[in-house]
Amino acid sequence: MKSFMRFLALLVVLLFPTGSLAQMADPSFKLDVGVGGGVSFPMSDLSNRTSRGWNVGLKTRLHGFSPLQVALGAHYNSLPLTSYGFFTGRGSLQHWIFNGGLEIPVPVGQRDYPYFSFGALLAAVENTGSFITTSSGGLEVGVGIVEPFAPRSTIDFDLKYQWMNLFGKDKFDGDFNQIQLMGHLMVGVVR
């Protein structure tokens, strides 16, 4: 867990090397908040090759003060159980993912643009059949696109690969990975 906290501290230092609260109050600072959801595809030891689940959650994006964008999110995921150790039996695999990272926009249009993303995450996983819970940290990488929807609003589509237990893995845990395909309706709160 210490290595995960060091990683988060490094991420903060890299995000705001010359930033200040005064810069964030600048008129170019923008804040978007959105709600959405999508499909989750379990990978590695979570997968039985045919399963898929769903996710729903919130996303915020800070942008305009740097060429990079800062994204934060909280998503609830539900996946069917597989035949792998911790995740066997009846019920389902429920987990919260809290993530934060950078989005690197690729400017190709006025308001619509693709982006690459990477970040860190904290996963809280529960097997509803056996009432066993575990927490761990991980990383994610992805791609997305932002499309204009209405004045001050966009629709974001994200595709992310998430390694959910790189940090804090128990001795007998397998690899808990998933692919998330999500859409969010984003509204500009600060412009």
Image (cartoon, rainbow, N blue to C red):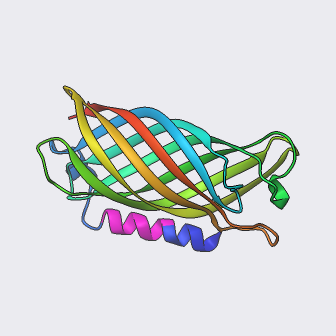
Foreground residue, 8 or 171? 171
| Residue 122 placement, left or right of 16 | right
Image location of residue 163, percent across then percent down: 58, 63
Image location of residue 137, percent across then percent down: 61, 62
Placement of 73 over or under 48, stated as above or below: above
Foreground residue, 84 or 62? 84
Is residue 103 visible in the rendered structure shown here?
Answer: no
Quadrant of the image occupied by residue 31: top left
Is residue 151 visible in the rendered structure shown here?
Answer: yes
Quadrant of the image occupied by residue 94: top right
Give the extent of the magenta segment. 8-16
Image location of residue 47, percent across then percent down: 68, 56
| Residue 141 placement, left or right of 149 | right
Q: Is residue 42 magenta?
A: no
Task: State the residue lying farthest toward the top.
Answer: 150
Q: Residue at x 31, y 62 (%)?
A: 16
Please tell me whether the stretch drawn in magenta is mainly helix, strand or loop: helix
In the picture, which quadrant includes the N terminus? Answer: bottom right
Task: State the residue lying farthest toward the left.
Answer: 110
